[in-house]
Amino acid sequence: MLAKRIIPCLDVKDGRTVKGVNFVDLRDAGDPVELAWQYSQQGADELVFLDITATHEKRKTTIDLVSAVARQINIPFTIGGGINELADAEILLNAGADKISINSAAVRNPKLIDDLAKSFGRQFVVVAVDTRVVNEKNYVHLRGGRDKTDIDTQDWIQEAESRGAGEILLTSMDHDGTKGGFDNSFLKRINSSIHIPLIASGGAGNVQHFLDVFEQTNVDAALAASVFHYGEILIPELKGALRKAGTVVR
C-alpha cells in the first residue's frame, strides 16, 4: 500500500503567501520561502506552489521566487500558475520544480496535456481542477474560479487522464477555506473513476477531516493551506494521528 501524502499549498500573490475563503477575501499568510523551509523541516511529503493570479493577470509564474523556494527544500515541489506552453514548463523545471500544475490552460487547450506528458513524462504533469456545484452538478471553473464553464468535472478529469495527466489536484470551491471538511462523497466518486493519483483539496479544518478523507475516499494525498500556515495543525501531530488510526504515511 502506497503511503498517503500530506501536502501544504502555498498560494502566492505579489510574492506573499495568501489564503481566503471560497477563493476570495485573501489575507496574508507569510513569506513563501520561509514557509516552504518550515514545511520541509516538519515532514511535509510535498509542496504545491500556485501563483494564483498569474493566469488572471496574464503573466508568468515568478521564476525568481520559484528558484528561491526550490533551494530551500528537499521534498518534491509542484509549481503552477500562468503555464501555457512547453517553454513555460521547461523554465520551471530548470528553476527547480519537480512537477508542474496546469489548470485553465489545459481546459482551453487540452492538447497541452498530451504535449507536456510526451515531452517530460506524465509523472511531471499535474492537472488542477477547480470545481463548484451549480444546480446540483459539479462544473469546472477557470481563472482562479472566476469563470464557470459548461464542462462536467468528472468528464474533464477522465479526459485529462486519457491525455497523459499523471495526477489530479481537485479543489472543491464550495469547501475551500471553510474548514468544514473535504467534499468526501464527490472525491470518492472521482477517485473510483480514474487510475492515477488524486489529491484532495478544499475544506481541511482539523485532524479528523484528514482521517475522514483518507478513510472514506482512499485518495492518494490531502492538501491544505490555512490550517498549516496559521499553525492550527502541525504536520508531525497530524501524521501521528493518521498512523494511530492505521493510515500509512511516510
Image (spheres, rainbow, N blue to C red):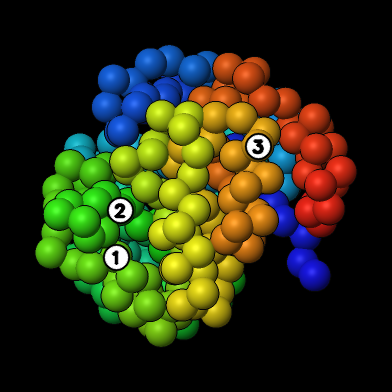
| Place of residue 118 in the rendered image (x, y in percent of width and height, measured from the top left) | 46, 82
| Place of residue 230 in the rendered image (x, y in percent of width and height, measured from the top left) | 58, 17
Tell me which amino acid carries mark 1: Thr
| Place of residue 157 in the rendered image (x, y in percent of width and height, measured from the top left) | 37, 71
- Give the foreground label among 1 and 3: 3
Q: Are marks 1 and 3 in contact (CB under 8 Å)?
A: no
Quadrant holding the N terminus: bottom right
Q: Are marks 3 and 2 in contact (CB under 8 Å)?
A: no
Kindly identify which residue carries mark 2.
131
Q: Is residue 138 visible?
A: yes
The alpha-carbon separation of the residues under discs 2 and 1 comes to 7 Å
Pick whichever of labels 3 and 2 is earlier in the sequence. 2
Within-10-Å neighbours for mark 2: few <14, some 14–19, many 20+: many
The front one of 39 and 154 is 154
All told, the count of numbered labels is 3
Q: Residue at x 38, y 77 (%)?
A: 158
The front one of 224 and 184 is 184
Pick whichever of labels 1 and 3 is earlier in the sequence. 1
Q: Residue at x 49, y 18 (%)?
A: 29
Q: Residue at x 80, y 38 (%)?
A: 241
Within-10-Å neighbours for mark 1: few <14, some 14–19, many 20+: many
Within-10-Å neighbours for mark 3: few <14, some 14–19, many 20+: few
Q: Is residue 122 visible?
A: no
Using residue 244 as the reference point, say whether residue 3 is left or right of it: left
Tell me which amino acid carries mark 2: Thr
